[in-house]
Image (cartoon, helix red, strand yellow):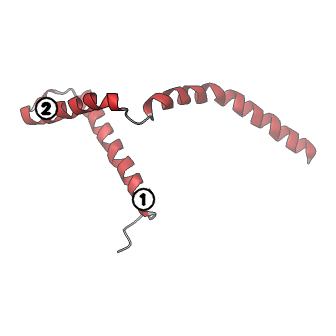
Amino acid sequence: ANRKLCNLCVIFAGLITQARPQLDVFLRYAKVELTPPTPADIPAIRQGLGNIIKGARTGAYKNLSVREAWLNTLVTAEVIFWFYIGECIGKRHIVGYNV
C-alpha cells in the first residue's frame, strides 16, 4: 500500500510539473481578460456600443468578411451562454423558475 501511494505521489508531481507552464499562461491571460472594467474603460465601451449601433443603421455589417462575421457570431453566442449560465446560477435551477 505504501509503494502504491509513493507511485501516486510521483505521478502527481509529474503532472504538476507538466501543467505548470500552461497554468502560468492561463493565469497571465486571466488577470487581463477576467478583470471587471474600470471607470477608465467606460468611454471605450460607449464608443464600441456606438459603433455597433451606427454599423447596424448604415448596413456596415454587409461589408464584413466571412471570418469577421463568424467571429462576431461566436462572441455573441458566448455572451448568450454566459448570460444563461448566470441565470441558472441565480435561480438555482437548471430548468424553469419557481412560480
Label 1: how many residues lie within 10 Å, few (<14), some (14-19) or many (20+)? few
Along the horizontal axis of the image, is 95 left or right of 46?
Answer: right
Residue under label 1: 90
Secondary structure found at label 2 = helix
Which label number is shown at residue 52?
Answer: none
Q: Residue at x 60, y 30 (%)?
A: 23
Residue 51: x %, y % from top left: 17, 30
In front of the other: 37 or 97? 37
Residue type pointed to by label 2: Gly
Label 2: how many residues lie within 10 Å, few (<14), some (14-19) or many (20+)? few
Secondary structure found at label 1 = helix
Q: Residue furthest right?
A: 2
Q: Is residue 91 above or below residue 28?
A: below
Along the horizontal axis of the image, is 32 left or right of 73?
Answer: right
Q: Residue furthest bottom?
A: 99
Q: CA distance from mark 1 to mark 2?
A: 34 Å
Which label number is shown at residue 55?
Answer: 2
Q: Residue at x 7, y 32 (%)?
A: 58
Residue 79: x %, y % from top left: 33, 43
Residue 61: x %, y % from top left: 15, 32
Q: Residue at x 37, y 68 (%)?
A: 96
Along the horizontal axis of the image, is 65 left or right of 71?
Answer: left
Residue 92: x %, y % from top left: 46, 63
Frontmost of labels 1 and 2 is: 1
Residue type pointed to by label 1: Gly
